[in-house]
Image (cartoon, helix red, strand yellow):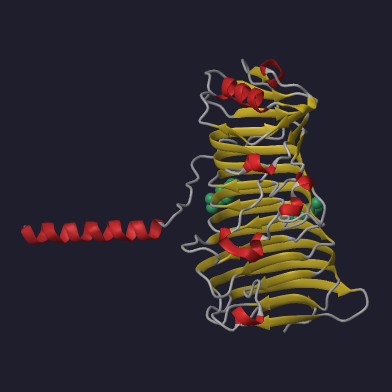
Amino acid sequence: MATAKRVEIVILCFALACYCVNAGPRIRPIAGPDIYKGQNIAKDSLAPGEKIVNVMNFGAKPDGEFDCTQAFMDAWRAACKSPGQNRLLIPPGRFLVSSMFFAGPCMAPKPITIQVVGTVLATTDISEYENGEWLMFEDIAGLKLIGGGTFDGQGQESWSQTEDCEKSGSTCVRNPSSLYFNKVTNGVIQNIKSVNSKGFHVFVTNCANMRLRRIGITAPDTSPNTDGIHISHSINVKLSKCNIRTGDDCVSMIQGVNNVTINRVNCGPGHGISIGSLGKYQNELEVRGVRVLNCTFVGTDNGLRIKTWPDRYTGAASDITFSDIAMQNVKRPIIIDQEYQCTPANCQKKPSLVKVSNVAFTNVRGTTISPIAVDLRCSKQFPCQNIKISNIYLKHASSPISSRCANIKPVYIGMQQPPPC
Ligand SMILES: *[C@@H]1O[C@H](CO)[C@@H](O)[C@H](O)[C@H]1NC(C)=O
Ligand SMILES: *[C@@H]1O[C@H](CO)[C@@H](O)[C@H](O)[C@H]1NC(C)=O
């Protein structure tokens, strides 16, 4: 009896120790039910009894100069923190707003709607954003952000002060993202525009069951770190019919991403659709289940990319498919780069510890501007596993193109232009 008890206690301690170690700093979100399943989410109408809460009734002025932050916060509180179905309305006009939270949980049982018709402008003093992003949507179960309006980050005022986070590593201070969704479930972000974000345009983290549709994203190709849509630690995300022209990745996905579909996204200018960089932080959660289909890339630096750091931490990316992709003048159309940001100095050290497996590139066609069109450089320690390359037809305007492979044995199916390694 006494022995049995002791064994139990030992097992319990073991389990706790394992739990704490595995839990690490982050926990993968759980999906829960998808409340929009089978519904036509493209349609918007006022729900019976839904009341409109207009920011104008809380002191907002649509002149683009008056600071509307307090008015927006008061209106949000009135819409979210009172019972009954309410809708926050930002009518036509230009509304200047500083860093602020749209914090939940909200009291209404149904999703809360934020309808943006006008333009929301970010204030330009970057010191106002030291502790966060621009517009932060947090702890909301059921959110619709719709209305055809525009979020203008006015980033052109601060881009010159941007640090390059890809080069300077984990201590880097990012510029604030324009729309930051943290712990939002059942979110529909639809028919809105983001221009000139200071940092990322849209940041999705710790979210589940998200739909991002018809989002127009614009910033100059020279704007630094202005990723279009950045996703981490999120499950069941569907991104469709977006036009993204920006200075960094059109879409970037890092650790903890699970079940993401990207359909009919047009990218360019920009740095393509990227998984990674991975292996940058300790205890990274794996990336699993990403489908990119029916997308186009015009004049982008990269097309379809998986990138991982050498000489850093463990991680994994698996079950990833890229299919039906059109490329026009793309620099690196297909690239697995497990020597990301590699310099002759650090690449001599340790190979990447990120495992890349079950990846398919299918039906990729169009034009490239560089001689290596399919560039697959995997880790010496963890060679890429089960990589399929099917029906690739890429051309260069004037010269022949080739493939490059390291630590990978892809399975080739159908047409291959460039020829396989
Ligand atoms: C993946 O997400 C989609 C919604 O984006 C959902 O319909 C589907 O059931 C999810 N798949 C799994 C295996 O959970
Ligand atoms: C891609 O788009 C075309 C036309 O828009 C459509 O016919 C095709 O079924 C789509 N492919 C996928 C995989 O959705």
Who's the residue at 80% across and 79% down the image?
Answer: 418
| Residue 298, x across and y down, in percent | 84, 60
| Residue 170, x across and y down, in percent | 56, 61
Number of marks in the image? Answer: 0
Who's the residue at 54% across and 71% down the image?
Answer: 354
Image vertical order of residue 311 relative to residue 285, above or below = below
- As rendered, which of 259 and 399 lies closer to the eye? 399
> The N terminus lies in which quarter of the figure?
bottom left
Image vertical order of residue 151 relative to residue 204, above or below = above
| Residue 381, x across and y down, in percent | 53, 81
- As rendered, which of 313 and 216 lies closer to the eye? 313
Extreme residue toward the left, this view: 1
- Is residue 17 found left or right of 298 in the rendered image? left
Residue 418 in view of the camera: yes
Who's the residue at 53% across and 47% down the image?
Answer: 206
Report which quarter residue 306 is drawn in: bottom right
Residue 408 in view of the camera: no
Report which quarter residue 224 is drawn in: bottom right
Extreme residue toward the right, this view: 398
Image vertical order of residue 318 relative to residue 46, above or below = below
Who's the residue at 67% across and 38% down the image?
Answer: 189
| Residue 117, x across and y down, in percent | 77, 28
Report which quarter residue 332 is drawn in: bottom right
- As rendered, which of 180 and 356 lies closer to the eye? 180
Image vertical order of residue 24 relative to residue 391, above or below = above
> The C terminus lies in which quarter of the figure?
bottom right
- Is residue 408 found left or right of 28 in the rendered image? right
- As rendered, which of 315 and 45 lies closer to the eye? 315
